[in-house]
Image (cartoon, coloured by chain):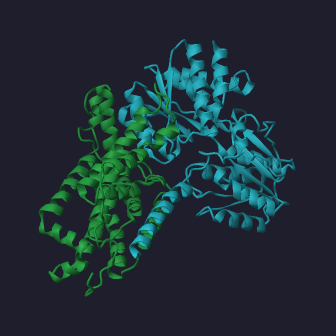
Amino acid sequence: MSSDTFLLLLGITLMYSTPMVFAAQGSVISEVSGVVNIGIEGMMTIGAFTGAAVGYFSGNPWLGFVCAGLAGAVFGLIHAFASVTCKADQTVCGIAMNLIGPGLALFLSRVFFDGATQTLPVTNKIPKLFGRSGLPGSLNNLNVDMTTVIALVVSILMCYIFYCTTWGLHLRAVGEHPAAADTLGINVYKVRYICVILSGLLAGLGGAAMTLAIVPQFMPTAISGQGFIAIAAVIFGKWTPHGGYLACLLFGFAQALTVVLGGGAFTVPSEILAMLPYVLTVLILILFVGRASAPKANGVPYNKGSRV
Amino acid sequence: MRKCTRRALTVLGLCLLLLLPACRFVRPGELTGGSAGAGGAGGSGSSMDLNVENVDGTGWKIAMITDTGGINDQSFNQSAWEGLQELQAETGAEVAYIESKQSGDFNTNFETLVDNGNTLMWGIGFACADAVLEAAEANPEVNFACVDNAFADSPMNVTGVVFRAQESSFMVGYIAAAVSETQKVGFVGGIRSEVIEQFEYGYEAGVAYANRVLDKNVRVSSQYAESFSDAAKGKSIANKMFTDGCDIVYHSAGGTGTGVIEAAKEAGKFAIGVDRDQAYLAPDNVLTSSLKNVNVAVKAVGKRHIAGQDIGGQTLSFGLTDDAVGIPEHHENYSDEIYEAAIEIGEQIKRGTIIPPSTKAELDAYTAGLK
């Protein structure tokens, strides 16, 4: 393998995994606090639209990026209200998020963009790490979007919060045994609210990483499955921020492999290649990843005074 | 036990939701309805004179239902509606549309249009094909038509409409080969199917033709993303092609293609758009586009219907001769000479002196004939 191919693989892996990394961190923080959030996909979609729309009208991609996070956070708040305060079934509520997200995004797109279901391309995208001129030759494959760097920073920050801060311990306790945490004076509802809102925020950022960095616009197909892959990546990564990050990278790498192996000299049928990421995931899951256990209270609404 | 059920439900829900985007967001025209006849898009459709002029459509009612993209989708629905509006302006026929919010609306929308007294109703995009067939069976006295679908066994009141995309692809293939400085061009397809292969083989034939007449040696690398929605993958494939030395990449991949155009923009290379003029996405980096003018087909079929011609029970094929496919006039990114040569090639295709291939076998025969 030439170094050019290696750099290409690396570049594609990083680009491909970025939106999923944000979403996976969002999923981790919600699940570890004990709230299942399968609405990640819907939250990403609304973030993707908001990011592209605000980026287009303001001309400032960073403003779009922040607004995308806020839009996701609003969805997170709704999810938190339904599943923490109202103790609704979290799966059903997540499905609702996944239906509302794209629906609302398309509706708003039609309102703001002359009835079109896709937005117009933004003039300024989120900049690249080494600027527009980039690096010489094939090294330019490493000229990743700033969002890729932010995704890495967020992941490291999450690890720090989870394992090096008191609050991180609190949130893990809430997900494992909320009643015990409650008796020690931790406000279970508050912790869960914060985590689910953060979860929406991160998912929204993930959506915007797609529509403000990878492509410059929102379209109905912008987010198609990344959120679900991120949820799978979290389970794959045993509900840890670093595990989720690595799992997303692995999936991105598998996609990069299909791109690099497809076409050209070897003629592997593209239908077979398209299965590679999933086959690889299953194989690694069987061979290298041991038993994964979810946070014990994951998906169970907490009733104050209950013993479990 | 309870936990198991919940887990199973979660997984089931995830699977169902994964399917959702696939059902809801398929762009019209990027897939075929899976009917065996679709392969004959270029061949089996009749291409007799489709243009009937000067008909009086007063009192006629013609309508369409959109697929889930909505009326202003900057693609087929919008184009079809423009065709109906032109039909109204030229013949005085009354036209209307109903938007479908979800695929379940197709049948109800057709029933509404039948109740409103329409005599020809369009389903836009292959996704409507089944609904068209059902509505046609329930309402044998009125006519239905479907864009981008060749029915294997078309009922007497159903018209399939397909496009000879290989013709416009041949033209853009010529342009790509003529413009290429690196002697390497690329093609990115969505999901492999006979309809998308028309684009691929027409394009490759155009490149081969240019190699012959311009004495060049441009090679084509083709790759399928196996997705119409994965823009990141489209961008990755295009990045790879640009890294490999391609300087022009043509796509026929819907949402995946958005990534191809973005990759061209970032790399300072060229992309070739599809279905409509995609130059607005990246004015400096979209070389040209291979157009599919649904409006032309919708208008022509409407006129034939008004003129009382028998349009049912067959698949009509539209191509360059009908101005239903082609390339945009503006060509800031390449020279007048190349543009004029491409137009001349279009004329030869119209005259039948060049017959662009639409399958692998036809392409092989075509390139063998060039030598």
Report the residue at 40% width, 29% height from top: B242
Left or right side of A3 for B170: right
Residue A44 position, x and y percent, is: 38, 59
A300, B327: nearer the viewer: A300
**Rendered image quadrant of residue B363:** top right
Quarter of the image with the C terminus of chain B in it: top right
Quarter of the image with the N terminus of chain B in it: bottom left
Left or right side of A240 for B150: right
Relative to A109, does residue B39 appear above or below in the rendering? above
What residue occupies the far bottom of the structure in this picture?
A305
Residue A50 position, x and y percent, is: 38, 60
Report the residue at 48% width, 64% height from top: B12
Residue A230 visible in this rendered orientation of the protein: yes
**Rendered image quadrant of residue B39:** top right
Relative to A67, does residue B220 appear above or below in the rendering? above
Q: Which chain is painted in green?
A: A
